[in-house]
Image: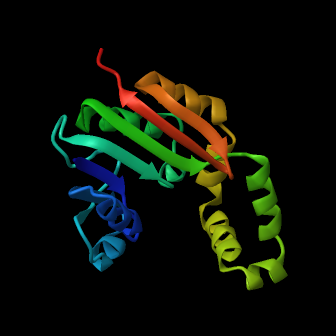
Amino acid sequence: MAYRHQSGRGSGLRALHHLGFSEVDGIDLSPSLAAAYAGPGKILVGDCRQLPFENASKDILIVQGGLHHLPVLPNDLDRVLNEGARVLSKDGLLVVVEPWATLFLSLSHALCRSRTIRMLSPKVDALATMIHYERKTYEQWLSHPGLILDSLRKSFGVERCHFRWGKIYFAGRKRTS
């Protein structure tokens, strides 16, 4: 099964390989993250707004924690979704896991404001650090849920969409018309 993934450090590629995916490709903007990866498949340096893959060449596209970095909503999101539709095979599946404004995320943000909790929890500290450095795009993403859902639904037929633990979990099929 051909697969494309927004890669970061590549842990998702390793997990998918262990699940039985044989052809895994990742893409990330960071040359240093791509160069540091050693595992199954390959990570390419690139931008999800212009994917370096052939038309209809992938069965599944997964974006986990990459869309909330897009600087211009809805334009960049629509570009990514159009590119995803272009590279997906006829019945290709898009899976998106991104932050979402839920009660759990609000609680997590409150914890991030505590120095003591940040010192005790590397995960809370990592979230607080990400929020600090990526505040503009992160807050923009969280403040436009209707726009984001409209873009996803316009571009892909929804198979699943639910919200829990501060995330949106979306799975949609490529539209055939």
Q: Position of residue 100 (x, y in %)?
A: 65, 46
**Residue 105 percent across, percent down from the top left:** 73, 54
Residue located 34% across and 67% down the image: 14
How many numbered marks, from 0 up? 0
Residue at figure coordinates x 24%, y 38% from the top left:
87
- Measuring 82% from the left and 70% from the top, which residue is drawn there? 113
**Residue 35 percent across, percent down from the top left:** 27, 76
Q: Nearer the viewer, residue 25 or 34?
A: 25
Query: Does residue 126 appear left or right of residue 83 in this picture?
Result: right
Can the viewer see residue 49 in this picture?
Answer: no
Asked whether residue 75 appears in the rendered view, the answer is: yes
The quadrant holding residue 111 is bottom right
Judging depth in this view, the residue of 61 and 22 nearest the camera is 22
Q: Residue at x 34, y 45 (%)?
A: 61
- Nearer to me, 33 or 22: 22
Q: Please name whichever residue, 82 or 176, is drawn nearer the observer in this view of the structure.
A: 176
